[in-house]
Structure formats: C-alpha cells, structure tokens
Image (cartoon, rainbow, N blue to C red):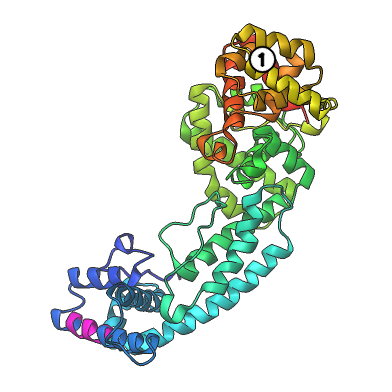
Amino acid sequence: MKSIERISKIDKQKLSGEHYFESVLEQACICKILSDSDVEKIQLEYLSLLAKQSEKFNNGDSCSIQIEKAQDLLNSIMYTIGLYLKTYENPDDAALALKQNTIDDMFIKGKKIIKRMVTTTKLLHLGIVNHIVNTQNVFYRSTIVDGINGFFKLYYPEFGAHKIHITADYPTYNGVQDLTGIEFIRKYLENIYFENLFCSFFSEDSIHHLLCGFDENYSELIINIYEPVLTSALGCVLVGKDINLELSDSDVSELTRIFENKTKPEIKEILGQALEAVKQKLSFKDSLFKYLSDSLPKIASDVKNAEDTKTINKIFIIPAYPENNTKIEFSYGKKMDNKLYRRIIEKIMQCQETQDKVQIIKENIHSLVDLEDILLDAELSDLEINEVLKILTPVEFTALLKKYPYRNDFEMDGLKESEKQLCSCLNNLLFSLPEKQRMMIEKAVSMSK
C-alpha cells in the first residue's frame, strides 16, 4: 500500500533555496505555525549566537566589529541553520523544529552537515579532475580545476558558510539556481560530472572539431561544451547516422525538414525519442539519462527559435577542420643598411608634397620589413600613409594587415601612437574596398601564419 504524502501548510514553492531559514521563518508566521512569542524567542537566540560568533571572530572583542561583517556573520549563521532545516522533507516539520530546538543546537547540527558536504564534494571534485575532458577551452579547466580548488582553499564555514568566493566562469548547461555556499559548489560539480560523463563517450578530436565548427577560436570563448555535443548526438540519431558528431550540410537540411512547422511540444517529443535511442546505443545509466532529459526543454526552445529564423545550422553544428586549411606565410625580406635607411627617412621628412614622399618610398624601399619601418618612423600623416598603402600589392597589404589588425580601445592602449595610426589606416582602407575584394583579403589574413 502506497504511503500518503502529508499535506503541508507551507507551500514549498514559496521557500528560498538560498535563504531557507529566513523563508521558513516567514512562511511559518504566515501559516500560524509559529506565534509572535515563538518568533521573538528565535530572534533573541540567533542574535545571542551572533554576539558569540562576533566575539569568536574578533578574538574576544565583539564591540568593535563592523556592521557589514556582523551582517555577514548573521548570514552565515542563517545559512548553516537553513541546511539543517532542509533535512526535514516536510517544511511544516522544519518550522516546528525552529519552535522545539534551540538556535545553538541547530547551528551545531548545520555545521556537521556542512563538514560532511565539504568532504563528499571534495571527493566528487577529485573524481572529475581525474577524468576531465581534454579541451583547448581556457575557461573549462581554469574553472573546474583551479577555480574549485580556490573555493576549497578560501571556504571557511565557521564565519562564511554562505560564501562561494569564485565566479564559476565556465557555465553548466543546466544552470544552478537559488543556491549558495557549499550547496552551490556541490550542485555545480554534479552538473559538471554528468556533462563530462556524456562527453566521455566521444573522442577528444571529435569534440574539438565540433567546437571548431561553432567557432575556430572557441578556446577563448565562454561556452558550454556539452550542449553542442548533445545536440549533435541527437541530430545524428534523427538523420539515421552513427553517433559520431559528424553532421553534414545534407544532414542539417534533413533536420530542417524534420523540425519544419513543428510546435515546441512536438519538437521536445522528437528530441525525447532521439534521446531514448542515444541511451540505447551508448548504454549509459538512468542518472545520466535524467540529466540529459532535463536539458531537452532548453534545446527544444533553441530549435524552435532556429526553425522560426531558418538557422537550424546554428544549433546542429557541422564540424570544421582548421588544420586542413592552407596556411599562407609571408616573407618580410631583409633590412637595408642603417645609414642608408636614415638617409631615406631624412629625405622623406624633408619633402612637403605627399606624392614626392610616395615616390621616394617606391624608388628606395624594396622589402616589406623596411616598408613597415618607414610607415612607423617617417612621421607620415594619415593621408600619406593611405597613399603608400594604395601602391601595395594585395599580398603586401594582407601581410601588414595580419601584423597590424584593428584592435579595440583596451588592446590599443599597449601600442605606440605610430602603431595605432597604422592599424587605423589599414582598417579604414580595408573597409573602403569593394566587398568581394575585402572578403578575399580577410580570408587570406585568417589563413596566414
């Protein structure tokens, strides 16, 4: 016979995961589980505990503690007690625990819970680090290894149980909401564990090429690796291919047809059936399947938006192989004699007319390395630099553009004024060219070493 779940006066949906103690106390008052005298007793007790913690933190002196730090200590106390209250499945029982137990006792029990959670979370982290996905994305390892190590190094639950200390730059696909402190870190690592576990079914090269299909510079982007891997696996099943993350243009066209004019629930149903097939082919456990299933609503929403905007190829990515691209290597030539170079510089700077300066450069400068120096040293105006750039061959112009790309203001701060000027002139001339010519030069720049 099935047990009947007790009806709770307190609505769980109204409780905060991050501020559980405060929300239980508030809802218990609203639902009349706690009386005004009960609340007064609880407040006096946690203020008394705050005084003890302040004295302990301040080496025996509780009077000189800053207001901000006192509030921080109170938040830590409430967080710790909240963890104990979460051990009650029914929130009404948690409210009664506030009535029947002392704040000091619940605080001690909460600290024991935190201690166990820290131990088990460290073990979870160690397991993840030992089986981490080998990826070029800089945010992945810096967060999961270095960032989490930083958390454990800084986490001091006696006075800061609610703190996280790190920014967790690398995002999990199924986000962590309404949690803080060790609870946030544990949930974050649980998400990472399942995402890593799924990615482990595929080779490092397959994932790398898939991410290159998203952006060749993915190593420097804050992106989630698991999402394109999962969507690609689902796409492979839907077009009847092996789950190898190798979708093609024709596969994406077929996926466009599959999702055409489908509603979001219909798309979720299609993806759900595909996920069942992925599970069967890869043979993974129900716990991983549940995590993957929790990702489907978000994927379905993305697919629906992509279907509406005819951009399914942004969801189901075609792998790219940048290592196969031909690389262009420029030769800058040899520098001329220093004395001769100085004479040419002096001659250019003595000229008044732009065309005379350009003529001197045409007659005397025969290597790209010398031309680069002239453009930086001869104190030319923007107009004069532009006139020199116009006489360059496309290869020479591309070589200079590769070395002096236009940067944002922050990156430009580290350049000399002459370098900034050359970057700007090159960029302006590039965007004054006909679109076809400009695109050819930009492609050549991207292919060059």
Image quadrant in which you'd find residue 126 = bottom right
Q: Residue at x 50, y 58 (%)?
A: 167
Q: Is residue 261 visible?
A: no
- SS state under label 1: helix
Q: Nearer the viewer, residue 158 or 394?
A: 394
Q: Residue at x 35, y 73 (%)?
A: 72
- Please identify the quadrant where the C terminus is shown: top right
Q: Position of residue 233 (x, y in %)?
A: 68, 40
Residue position marked by numbered label 1 in the rendering: 389
Q: Which residues are magenta?
A: 39-46
Left or right: residue 268 compared with residue 369: left
Residue 130 among magenta residues: no
Image quadrant in which you'd find residue 44 = bottom left
Q: Residue at x 29, y 68 (%)?
A: 23
In the rendered structure, which amino acid carries the disc numbered 1? Answer: Leu
In the image, residue 42 above or below residue 195 = below
Residue 45 among magenta residues: yes
